Image (spheres, rainbow, N blue to C red):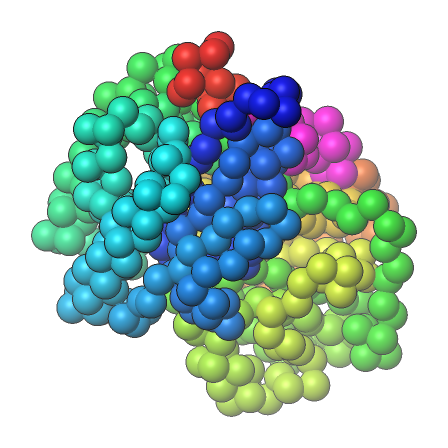
Amino acid sequence: MGYSPGQKKPCICIVVENLPVPLDRRVWQESCALRDAGYEVIVICPQMQGYTQPEEKLDGIQIYRHPLSEEANSVGGFFREYTSALWGEFRLLCKAWRRHRFDIIQLCNPPDILFAAAAPFKLAGVRLIYDVHDATPEMFEAKFGKRGLLYWAVRIAEWWTHFFADTVIATNQSVSNIATGRGGQAAEDVFIVRSAPKIPTAKIEPNPELKKGRTHLVGYVGVMGSADGIHRVIEAAHYLVTELGREDVQFLLMGFGPEYENLVRLRDELGMGDFVDLPGRVEGAALFSALSTMDLGVSGDPVNSYNHHCTMNKVLEYMAVGKPQVTFDLKESRYSAGAAAHYVSEVTSQALGQAIADLLDDPARREQMGQLGQARFRSELNWEKSVEQLEAAYAHTLGQA
């Protein structure tokens, strides 16, 4: 999309609550892609995880950040966090409206209550895009183990967001089906924009030191929360060493989140300090160097209705660098990875550990899986394909399609 020097660029305002930018990789990549397509881009996000400047312009993108009362881990905490976030978002939307007169608001869930801050701007003719990162009702059901009052409250909020939305962006087909099902969206108003890593253009050099002198390196990258099942990966490492006698395998679990300290404690309680490294968040060239050093990637996400709807970033990151992976048998993971992954049907640490051992002992299969995954990523699941869909979603919203 091109615009002449005298022509006003369409202005968009992206609102995200659960992570700041540029830390939220999907939102930041979307922002940069839309900027490159000729839009003026504004992002509203929380002040957290080291990104505390209330206002800055980064790579041509205007960012406004609001304080957040806390990161919720209880029903009361969710209420306080979301109330604080809504007020901050509405206040910054008003500021951005006065300064920029945006044409579109893009709401990124979770949570699904951001429509309350954006709805007043619909009266001014602003169009609304609902960027569904997570199937939030399923997320709450998995978190609390039941469909309680909070689950149904989230279902209502999800419905209202769909009601206000002109266009929906979904991360995969499962989420798209929710939008056209219980969301009531017309199929032509829903666009699938898959999350995918942007691969560095410079040559990626492996780092053999990460193996700590051992033959194999098994890696994980991603968020470390209660729903991510990383404790099973640590327990699988323990099973490999103590039950299978495999002292030739080093584990590198990269990432950070609310469960990080508990995971470090679990590792140390199991006596796995020499075999499991937990370096925290790893980014940029160091991340891709680590990924290229790994012999295989691993995921511990358990089988539930929420995870079946998720396209895991780590699954695509392993594929992008040509690494095979072991994961529990999840619908969208199976769609993404196909033959590039070994799927474990029994959700136990022992089964995960045994699958890792079996794949490490089959180098020919690992090589074939890695090649298949990388080819699929480059041909079908790369970020450039997603940018095409993102631009189509915006053209549709503006009535240009």
**Position above or below: 21 against 4:** below
Question: How many marks do you count on the picture?
Answer: 0
Taking depth in this image into account, of 221 and 248 the one nearest to the observer is 221
**Horizontal and vertical percent for residue 287?**
72, 61
* Residue that extends furthest to the front in the rendered view of this protein: 6
Rendered-image quadrant of the N terminus: top right
> Going by the image, does 389 lie left or right of 397?
right
Task: Give the residue displayed 33% in from the left and 43% down from the top.
Answer: 98
Indicate yes or no whether the magenta region holds residue 385: yes
Task: Give the residue displayed 30% in from the left and 71% down from the top.
Answer: 70
Task: Give the residue displayed 55% in from the left and 22% down from the top.
Answer: 7
Taking depth in this image into account, of 152 and 190 the one nearest to the observer is 190
Indicate yes or no whether the magenta region holds residue 246: no
**Horizontal and vertical percent for residue 114?**
26, 45
> Going by the image, does 276 lie left or right of 70?
right
**Position above or below: 229 against 240:** above
Q: Could you tell me if residue 339 is visible in this image?
A: no
User: Which portion, as a residue range, is magenta?
Assistant: 373-391
- Determine which quarter of the picture holds residue 169: top left
- Determine which quarter of the picture holds residue 126: top left
* Residue that extends furthest to the top in the rendered view of this protein: 401
Magenta region, mostly helix, strand or loop?
helix
**Horizontal and vertical percent for residue 174?**
41, 31
Taking depth in this image into account, of 153 and 397 the one nearest to the observer is 397
Taking depth in this image into account, of 290 and 358 the one nearest to the observer is 290
**Horizontal and vertical percent for residue 216?**
80, 67
**Position above or below: 364 against 353:** above
